[in-house]
Amino acid sequence: FLDQVSNGYVESVVLVNDRKVDGVYTERAVQQGLVEVKVIQPGILTGNTPETPNRFLSTKPLDHELIQFLIEYNAAQIEAGGDEVAFDASQEENWFGGLMTWIFPLIIIIALWVFLIRRMNPGSQVLNIGKNKAVLFDAMAVQKLSFKDVAGLNEAKEEVVEVVDFLKNPKKFTRLGGKLPKGVLLVGPPGTGKTLLAKAVAGEAGTPFFSLSGSDFVEMFVGVGAARVRDLFKQAKEKAPCIIFIDEIDAIGRSRGKGMMMGANDERENTLNQLLVEMDGFNTDTGVIIMAATNRPDVLDSALMRPGRFDRQILIDKPDRRERAKIFEVHTRDLILGDDVNAEVLASQTPGFAGAEIANVCNEAALLAAREGKDAIGMDDFEKSIDRTIGGLEKKNKIISPDEKRIVAYHEAGHAITGWYLKYTDPVVKVSIIPRGLAALGYAQYLPEERYLYTREALIDRMIMAMGGRIAEEIIFGRISTGAQNDLERITAMAYAMVVDYGMSERIGYVSFNLSSGSDSPQFSKPYSDETARIIDEEVKAIIDEVRVSARQVLDEHADKLEALAQALLEKEVLGPKDLLTILGARPHGDYIDVDAALAATHLEVNGEASTEETETKSTEEPLASTESAASEESAASEEPGASDASDKPAESDSSDKTD
């Protein structure tokens, strides 16, 4: 273009928007063929037309001063007597581009807002955020459960079956004047089958069954929880008679007024208030039964717990031996079992196990058998699975020095000896110095009885058994290690419980200062004087001194057995019932378990290396088969003081100690 201007081929130029050059060639240049004129094509906006046959278009670079160039060119042409190039500039408005400049960012903002709203509340739109999230069981009845799939909850099933029967056959009860219960609250520890029982009700009810969680009412927007409660009951009343199941109701049912700042608004309390009104208020209707489940009944609001809202509170506790056997039968009926598998023996080996733990044991046994390429699941697979559930993963390849291995062996032998010869301890069926879990170096396994009350003598014996590992180290090595840390913690806790909670001290008297029960809030004051606190400390020290003396006396009397048992552990690493009977002789107090049955129930392993720089114990609190580690171990005997309330803690899971 610039060359054509310099050669005099351009007659006029219009600069549009300082970017586009719209020019006209001279007639002479076109006729002589000095320039090429493009013929306009359909859809092409450049080129000549009949009105402008010599027109051309070009584009100006951004950094070029075209106007200045034309001014200088015209000045030179005037001096030389040549023809000037007429030029002008114009500004055209691009309304579409301007419009898109505003609309496009607005579209992006709206799309981002919609995306965020959907992410905050998946599956629902802004306008139906107040709708409840309950799932109607008929829509998800792919795996239909029935009461035959629920084993070991006979009393609870009887209560719940009656509710289902009432819905199916109301005349059976109303002919005597009875009324349909409005609410059923399932209470129990985790894993005992509360939700499973509710699923069975859904499968058996034959009526609409709405299922949701307590946290489904909670939302980031104020008022949504109460709106969802209203919508849930509106939908339920339309389908009455029906059942509403709220799992983990403590998410919205906690006592009101606790932990509130002055003047603050608690959305959860508004949700609870609406639930209370819907369950038993002026506008309540018949035919809607509320089922709920929780493992924290102590934190629920008293207004929610009263009759008229929850007429029945059904306790679902951990199963006893007979119930565990039935649960094993349910979970193994779809498994390929060997001829040696005995549900009764498995039940006796798993005291304190909840239904969920038993299901996990069965699944682990199946996986272990499949890993080894077996055609059927044997008793040894179940035993390995139980050991893994109680003590953790077996680690045979841990490296431990010979000195530490001896400490572990004598530590475990000390527990086994004291537990064998004391009257109120549970029979030892297995002792191992093969490490398990994160840091446990060894353990002793017991078969505790189903026991719900503990005398002072029984608690003392269990504390002696817990002290046995530390005292064995003192006797054999003349020094102590960090391995007994957890034992001492448990002994101390049990001694304080005897004095403070259970009134087992003559000096303190028949009083109980149970600070751990009744409230979620921390205790800022003790309900006794400083003098009483001093006496409590003295009594605890006296009990522990008594335990220490008794443990040393037992081990001194059976020093030869201690040595023999420790040497056998160093040689074999795992000792079973027959080995224990051979080394220790008949148990002096009570009958020992049938050796053949115990042997079938206890998988003996004789290979693997023991251990690690950390000496640690893993033991299941009684009544669970206790696992203790030589270096740092926990014994079933040293069960928490609360063990004397077996109804509260029928069995605790494992805990571990650590040696630094």
Image (cartoon, rainbow, N blue to C red):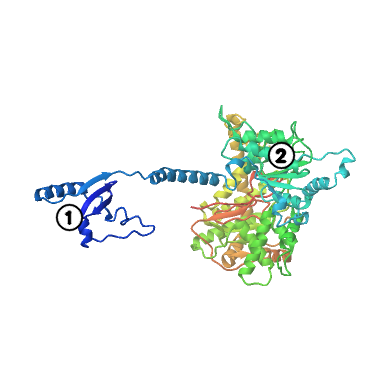
What residue is shown at x 39% (from left), y 46% (from top)? 97
- What amino acid type is highlighted by mark number 1? Gly
What residue is shown at x 59% (from left), y 67% (from top)? 572
**Viewer-closest of 155 and 36:** 36
What secondary structure is found at the residue carrying circle 1?
loop
Check disc 1 and report the residue beneath it.
8
Image coordinates for residue 53, horizontal then vertical, percent: 29, 56
- Residue 17 has which mark? none
Whether residue 63 is situated above or below residue 430 in the rendered picture: above
- What amino acid type is highlighted by mark number 2? Lys
Give the mark nearer the N terminus: 1 vs 2.
Answer: 1
Instruction: Count up the numbered dots.
Output: 2
User: How would you rate the neighbour count of disc 1 (Cα within 10 Å): few for under 14, some for 14-19, many for 20 or more?
Assistant: some
The residue lying furthest to the right in this view is 175
Confirm whether residue 20 shows in the render.
yes
Image coordinates for residue 351, horizontal then vertical, percent: 70, 54
Image coordinates for residue 147, horizontal then vertical, percent: 77, 54
What residue is shown at x 67% (from left), y 33% (from top)? 273
Whether residue 26 is situated above or below residue 183 in the rendered picture: below
Q: Quadrant of the N terminus?
A: bottom left
What secondary structure is found at the residue carrying circle 2?
helix
The answer to whether residue 235 is left or right of residue 18 is right
Image coordinates for residue 463, horizontal then vertical, percent: 63, 48
The residue lying furthest to the top in this view is 263
**Viewer-closest of 559 and 203:** 203
